[in-house]
Structure formats: C-alpha cells, structure tokens
C-alpha cells in the first residue's frame, strides 16, 4: 500500500514539474516575444526620431551623429539582452521609458519645425483697404453705395487704391464714380462734409489720423463697410551700398535685422504703422548685438516719397520693404532681413516664458493698465511688459524713453530665451512666436543660427543705443499738413553709424546703456 502511495506521489511530482517547466517555457517565450515587440517599437520610434531630427536640421552635425550612434546602440542592446531573463526585463523597462521620451522629443522637434516654417520665408505683405461711410449711414454693403460717389487719395498708395476700385467694379459689375483728394485728411473731411458717399483708403491711416488734433474720434465718426485685402510681394533690393560713402556691405559673421513692431492685434503680415523700429546688428565673431532704436516720429524721407519727409512710423503703412529701405537710407547700411512682430503678441511669448526681468530707469506708473514699476529690475508678466513698453506720458522725454523701454523688454526676452526656462516652456513659447512674428529669413538661415548657438552656446553681449532729435510741427508726406515730428539730431545719428561701423569691423563696443 505504501509503495503505491509513493509511486502516486512521484507521479504527481513529475507531472507538477512538467507543468512548471511548461509554464516557465511559456513565460520565457512571452518575455522573448514581448521583448522583441518592445525592441521593434523602440526601433520604429528611434528611426522616426532620427528622421525628424535630420529633417528639421537644427542640431549641430557632431551632436546629431553622437545621438544617432547612441540610439542605434541602445536598440542593439535591447534586442540582444532579450536572450536573458533578468537583463531582458531591465532593458524592457528602460526601452519603454526611453521610447516615451523619444515620442515627446518627436513632438518637440515637430513643433519646432512648424514654428520656424510658420514665421520664416514671408515674402508677401497685405494692405487692408477699407470702404468707409459716416457712422450714421444706412449703407451696409458696397452694393448700397453703387449709385454714390467714392472718394480716393490721388497721391498716396495709389496702386492699392486702383486695385480696390477694380475689385469693387468687378463685384458690382459696373464702374463706380470716384473723386480724387490730395491727402488722407482732405479725403476724410470730404466724407465728414458729405461731399462723397464713401471713402476708400488704407485702414492703417485710421491710427495715423487718430493721433491728430481734431480727428481723435475718427473711429466713432466712421463706419467700415468692408475690407479688400491687397497682397504684394516684399521686394528685397540688392545691396548697392558703397563702403566709400560710409556704408557697410554684408560681411560674413555680421548681419543686420530690422525689427518692426506693430501695436495692434491681427496677422503680423498686415501693413500697419510701425510703432517699434529697432535695428539689430549682430556679430557672431565677437558675440555682440547692437540694438539701435529709431523713434517712431523721426522726420525722414521715405523711400517712396521722392525726398519728402514723413514720420518713420508711417513707412509701415506702405509695407515692410518701405521701412527697410528708409532705414537703409538713414543709416547707410544694408539690412539683410526683417522681423515683423505683433507687439501685443509679446504678451503670449512673455507669459509662456513665465515672465521676464526688465530693468527700468525710472519709478513710474503706466497709463496702460495702471501697473507700477520701480527703478531697477522688475519681474513682469506679458500684460505688465506691454504696459511698460507702451508708456510715454510718464517721461519728460516721451517717445524717446518709450523706445528705450521697448529695447529693455526685447533684451530681457532674449536673455530669458537663452535660459533653461525656454526649454521648460518650449512648445508654448513656439506657439506664441508662431502667432505673432513673421520674417523673410529662410528656414535654413534660422536653423543655421540655432545650430551655431547650440554648438558653442556663446553668451551674448547686448548693447543698446537710441538716436534722438527735437520736436516740431511740420508737414508730412502721408498727411500733407503740419504734424508733430522729431527732427533728427545729427550727432546721435553719427554716433549710431560709428557703433555700426565698429560692429562690422569686429570691434567690441560699449554704449554705456
């Protein structure tokens, strides 16, 4: 009886061992299959990441090569270690975690590509031509005005005006009656006096007139019936500067960028008054950036005005190329690129950076938002920074100090973007940038600058300077009647040109600002 029980026990143990071995083989097989599957997924994600990294092309070549080698080695290690239980389990865990990191990396890289693509290579600008009537007019569409008379400006922005008249004629299948006036104010007065039924002019002139005594309430007196967008190509003129005449031709390692700030909402490609006019001269050899602020009211000949002087800010109404050409004439410099910024878009960028630290030369309270700033360093969110950059009434020097404050905000933003906060808030910063900036720099040119920065991580010395002048009331090309302007101080202009020359000659400068 005992022998029978022993045999039964041995048989049960044998069966149990067989089941255990089968279960063990099953587990090992499952581990192998899952390991190979994880390794396969890791390989696919790695290939996608490497392809995106190559496509976006913002990392230095040596760094990309190192990353590619490490990624391939990790894939090989993950695959080989699946032959062993414990090492296989360890590498599975790391492979899953690392794959998730690569997925996040793919999202970041793709966001970078989209952001750079959105802002780069902008070769067109838009002029929004408005059809205006009096605020109490019963007209709601252009069709309601077909039997009336349309006033137009004869001597300013005629190309866009003629295109708009042609668009209206096509829309109505008839030719409208037009009467010409010699300036914006004369045209608006004709509408006020009901000499015309409607007026056709560049919508940016509304902000120009609203600053003039007697026209402060123009937005309340007029009603916009419709808008016709006229798209034009931004023309990059060849560099005709002559170094013998004090100009500075393009030089390797040195380039100039015009930063135009429009203080309105909407797409940065739309032509508007340029409230911010900052020239950046960048020397990648000495790692210095010279910021030159030109006040918006600077009284200069525009590139389209045949020598007639106007406020610099009005150049923006005629397109970014008009502003660029005008500043090239003023400083005797070839401007390589432009960066157009919707200044209210700075709010989003600064908020995504979790604020910036801006130096204020004065203790004051801004009329824009009621924010108070102390003399010294102030930590500002986007709304506060915009209030700081807009303020001019608190200062005896008015617009001159506003220009300095705008440069202080830009300097703070550059410094913050060079810090770790940029990496921590990367995608949100890119989204804000995409919505508020446009530049004619190509994707490749931007990526080259990014690669240069990442390759050596240089620290930049940012120097700022503002040209100055004296206030007066003189006729302007865009208005044809006296208006507040700033007559340039030649001494400050010459000093700015001297700083530019030094930057081009690789001489380290100190503006004292």
Image (cartoon, rainbow, N blue to C red):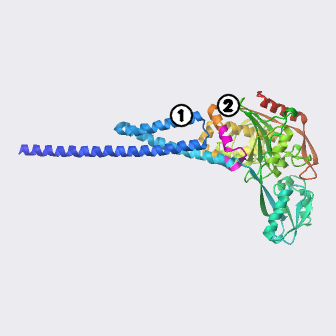
Label annotation for residue 66: 1
Question: Is most of the magenta stretch helix, strand or loop?
Answer: helix
Q: Is 441 within the magenta?
A: yes
Specify whether 263 is left or right of 213.
Answer: left
Specify whether 355 is left or right of 74.
Answer: right
Q: Is 286 within the magenta?
A: no
For residue 309, above or below residue 210: above
Between 474 and 75, which is closer to the camera in this rendering? 75
Spatial CA distance of label 1 from label 2 is: 24 Å
Q: Find residue 152 and report its horizontal and vertical position in percent.
A: 88, 61
Q: Quadrant of residue 190?
A: bottom right
Q: Residue at x 28, y 43 (%)?
A: 24
Q: Quadrant of residue 177?
A: bottom right
Dot 1 alpha-carbon crowd within 10 angstroms: few under 14, some 14 to 19, many 20 or more:
few
Q: Earlier in the sequence, mark 1 or mark 2?
A: 1
The label nearer to you, 1 versus 2, is 1
Work out which residue is located at the far left of the displayed protein and give it.
1
Q: Residue at x 86, y 41 (%)?
A: 329
Q: Secondary structure at mark 2?
A: loop
Q: Is the N terminus in the top left, top right, bottom left or bottom right quadrant?
A: top left
Q: Which residues are magenta?
A: 431-448
For residue 156, above or below residue 47: below
Between 394 and 146, which is closer to the camera in this rendering? 146
Q: Find residue 494 and report its horizontal and vertical position in percent.
A: 87, 33
Which residue has dot 2 on it?
459
Label annotation for residue 286: none
Specify whether 390 is left or right of 75.
Answer: right
Q: Find residue 296 and report its horizontal and vertical position in percent.
A: 84, 44
């Amino acid at each position: 009886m005992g022998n029978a029980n022993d045999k039964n026990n041995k048989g049960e143990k044998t069966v149990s061992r067989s089941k255990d071995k089968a279960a063990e083989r099953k587990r090992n097989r499952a581990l192998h299959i899952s390991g190979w599957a994880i390794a396969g997924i890791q390989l696919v994600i790695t290939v996608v990441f490497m392809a995106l990294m190559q496509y976006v092309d913002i990392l230095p070549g040596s760094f990309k090569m190192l990353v590619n080698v490490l990624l391939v080695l990790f894939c090989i290690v993950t695959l080989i270690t699946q032959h062993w239980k414990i090492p296989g389990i360890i590498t599975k865990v790391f492979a899953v975690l690392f794959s998730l990191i690569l997925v996040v990396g793919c999202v970041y890289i793709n966001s970078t590509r989209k952001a750079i693509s959105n802002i780069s290579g902008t070769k067109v600008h838009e002029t929004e031509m408005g059809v205006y009537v009096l605020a109490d007019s019963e007209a709601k569409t252009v069709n309601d005005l077909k039997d009336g008379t349309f006033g137009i400006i004869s001597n300013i922005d005629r190309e866009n005006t003629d295109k708009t008249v042609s668009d209206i004629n096509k829309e109505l299948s008839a030719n409208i009656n037009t009467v010409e006036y010699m300036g914006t104010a004369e045209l608006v007065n004709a509408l006020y006096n009901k000499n015309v039924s409607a007026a056709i002019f560049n919508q940016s002139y509304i902000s120009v007139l609203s600053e003039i005594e007697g026209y402060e309430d123009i937005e309340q007196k007029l009603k916009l019936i419709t808008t016709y967008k006229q798209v034009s190509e931004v023309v990059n003129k060849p560099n005709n500067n002559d170094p013998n005449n004090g100009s500075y031709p393009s030089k390797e390692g040195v380039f100039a960028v015009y930063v135009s700030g429009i203080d309105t909402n909407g797409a940065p490609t739309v032509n508007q008054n340029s409230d911010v006019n900052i020239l950046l001269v960048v020397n990648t050899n000495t790692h210095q950036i010279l910021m030159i602020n030109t006040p918006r009211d600077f009284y200069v000949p525009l590139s389209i005005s045949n020598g007639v002087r106007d406020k610099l800010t009005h150049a923006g109404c005629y397109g970014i190329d008009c502003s660029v050409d005008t500043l090239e004439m003023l400083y005797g410099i070839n401007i390589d690129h432009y960066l157009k910024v919707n200044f209210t878009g700075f709010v989003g960028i600064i908020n995504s950076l979790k604020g910036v630290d801006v130096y204020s030369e004065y203790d004051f309270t801004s009329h824009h938002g009621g924010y108070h700033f102390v003399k010294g360093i102030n930590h500002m969110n986007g709304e506060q920074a915009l209030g700081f950059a807009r303020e001019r009434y608190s200062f005896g020097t008015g617009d001159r100090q506003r220009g300095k404050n705008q440069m202080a905000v830009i300097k703070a933003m550059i410094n913050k973007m060079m810090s770790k906060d940029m990496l921590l808030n990367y995608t949100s910063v890119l989204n804000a940038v995409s919505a508020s900036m446009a530049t004619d720099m190509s994707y490749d040119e931007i990526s080259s600058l990014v690669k240069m920065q990442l390759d050596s991580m240089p620290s930049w010395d940012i120097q700022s300077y503002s040209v100055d002048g004296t206030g007066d009331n003189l006729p302007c090309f865009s208005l044809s009647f006296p208006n507040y302007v700033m007559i340039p101080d030649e001494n400050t202009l010459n000093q700015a040109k001297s700083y530019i020359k030094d930057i081009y000659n690789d001489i380290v400068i100190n503006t004292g600002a």
